[in-house]
Amino acid sequence: MTNTLYARLRRGGALAALIASVAVSPVGAQAQQAAPSAQASNTQPAAIPMPSRAQQLILLQSTLAALDQANRTGDYGVLVKLSARQFQLTNTPEELAGGFSGFRQSGIDLSPILLYAPRWTQEPWIENGVLRMVGVFDTNPQQVTFDLAFILEEGRWKMVGISAGLNAPRAAP
């Protein structure tokens, strides 16, 4: 059984969802709005360097640890404050609490992921200024899936999209 939860992203007046088990394109559209347009400035956009693997792991684990703490306390304010301005403007702590209520109600503990290395379902990549990280932690009795999106803002990578879910563990080969 898959229990996929999501945070909402708004584009214009429309609602788009980041769901871990589905191919996602709304995040790229969101990032295009957040990033300055090359056409508007008549210059080529600067290439954004890929963060090191250590930096990727810090982003991944600190974001999921913040989600775990928000789930445990019911207070999603810190998760919102750690995110990019665009995410803050379109997602309230109350909306995140609703989106992740299944984790809270089930008492899901995400803290064991801090002891596991992620298994990337796709190597992290940057597209249209958005760093995407998609994968799974091979935890038991269920795997923790993730789909995270970040943009560079004020010199730091900040979250613009988050999805986490649970899957049955994969069968041994």
Image: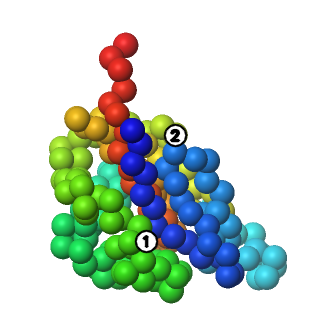
- Amino acid type, mark 1: Lys
Q: Nearer the viewer, residue 161 or 158?
A: 161
Few, some or many residues within 10 Å of mark 2 (<14, 14–19, 20+): few
The circle on residue 122 is 2
- Mark 1 vs mark 2, CA separation in Å: 20 Å
- Amino acid type, mark 2: Gln
- Residue at 23 percent across and 35 percent down: it is 141
> From the viewer's perspective, is residue 78 above or below residue 173?
below
Q: Are marks 1 and 2 in contact (CB under 8 Å)?
A: no
Q: Quadrant of residue 41?
A: bottom right
Q: Point out the image quarter for the C terminus.
A: top left
Dot 1: element? strand
The image position of residue 106, as x and y in percent, is 24, 55
> From the viewer's perspective, is residue 132 above or below residue 32?
above
Few, some or many residues within 10 Å of mark 1 (<14, 14–19, 20+): many
The circle on residue 158 is 1
- Residue at 33 percent across and 51 percent down: it is 57
Q: Nearer the viewer, residue 27 or 117?
A: 27
Q: Quadrant of residue 70?
A: bottom left
Q: Earlier in the sequence, mark 1 or mark 2?
A: 2
The answer to whether 84 appears left or right of 24 in the picture is left
The image position of residue 108, as x and y in percent, is 23, 53
Q: Point out the image quarter for the N terminus.
A: top left
Q: Nearer the viewer, residue 170 or 113?
A: 170
Is residue 46 visible from the viewing direction of this image?
Answer: no
- Residue at 49 percent across and 61 percent down: it is 149
The circle on residue 26 is none
